[in-house]
Image: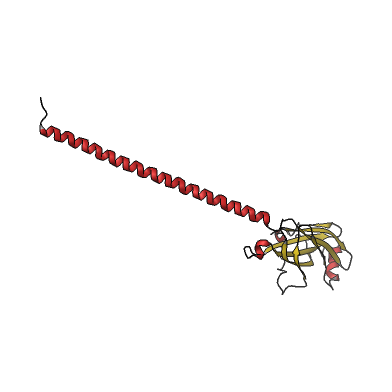
Amino acid sequence: MPETPENDDSSNGNRRHWLDHAAVWAATAAALAAAAAAGVGSWQGIIANQQLAVSKDTEIRQLRAYLYVRHYPIDADQTTASAKIEIWHAGSTPAYRIKLDTQMMVGQYLVGQLSLPDITSPSVGPVERVEHSILYSTEFIPQTVSMPKYSTEATRAVWSKDPLIGDNRFYVHGVVRYLDVFGVEGLQPETRYEFCFVYHPERDPNGSERGCEKYNKPG
């Protein structure tokens, strides 16, 4: 039996309905694919930028100047004391405008919280202050740090066996400040390296960081 026009209209309507849905699905899939591609591209861009930043940071680290301090046994008697230190260079480019501030003092050992002053401040003294214009990796800066004048009583306290006086030690405290090639160009701030060594002429003549660990802060 032939289909009526009404049936033809219904069939055509269904086909149009299906085609409309197909078009919507196709558009949605295309949009999702485009978003995914954009997301991948954006993520790849982020990774590339991160890799570039790491590469640049590594390059800067390899070219920076790194200074460190060697210390030697103390030379002390009942009236005075001194210890030799050396500032060494471990980097690949020179260090510039090196400022070295050092001080030797006497203090009780492992009693309470050690409190040392900021010896870079002009108001703190007596402090030995020296400056050098440049330091290459093949060189070092020698420095002898001594007890200040008129400190005989403090020095005797280190040698004392009196339990009422307690265990007193010599403290060598210092700060090295310098610029590397990036600092000279204004790309990096001045580097600050703080150090501290504790000596006793009999119990620990070679010196150590024990007792003033918090004042050993490499730059």
Q: Is residue 47 left or right of residue 185?
A: left
Residue 65 % position (x, y) = 70, 58
**Residue at left 49%, top 49%?**
45
What is the total number of numbered labels drawn onto the structure image?
A: 0
- Seen as rendered, the residue at the extreme bottom is 123
Name the residue furthest top: 1
Please give the name of the residue rendered at 36% of the width and 45% of the height, measured from the top-left corner.
Answer: 31
The quarter of the image holding the C terminus is: bottom right
Residue at the image position 48 percent from the left and 47 percent from the top:
43
Name the one closer to the observer, 105 or 59: 59
Front-lying residue, 74 or 161: 74
Counting from the top left corner in percent of width and height, residue 138 is at 78, 57
Where is residue 68 drawn, in percent x and y? 74, 58
Q: Position of residue 73 (x, y in %)?
A: 85, 58
Position of the N terminus by quadrant: top left
> In the visual, does 18 lie left or right of 155?
left
In the depicted structure, whether residue 195 falls above or below residue 43: below
Q: Considering depth in this image, is 203 or 165 the residue closer to the camera? A: 203
Residue at (41%, 44%) from the top-left corner? 36
* Residue 114 seen by the camera: no
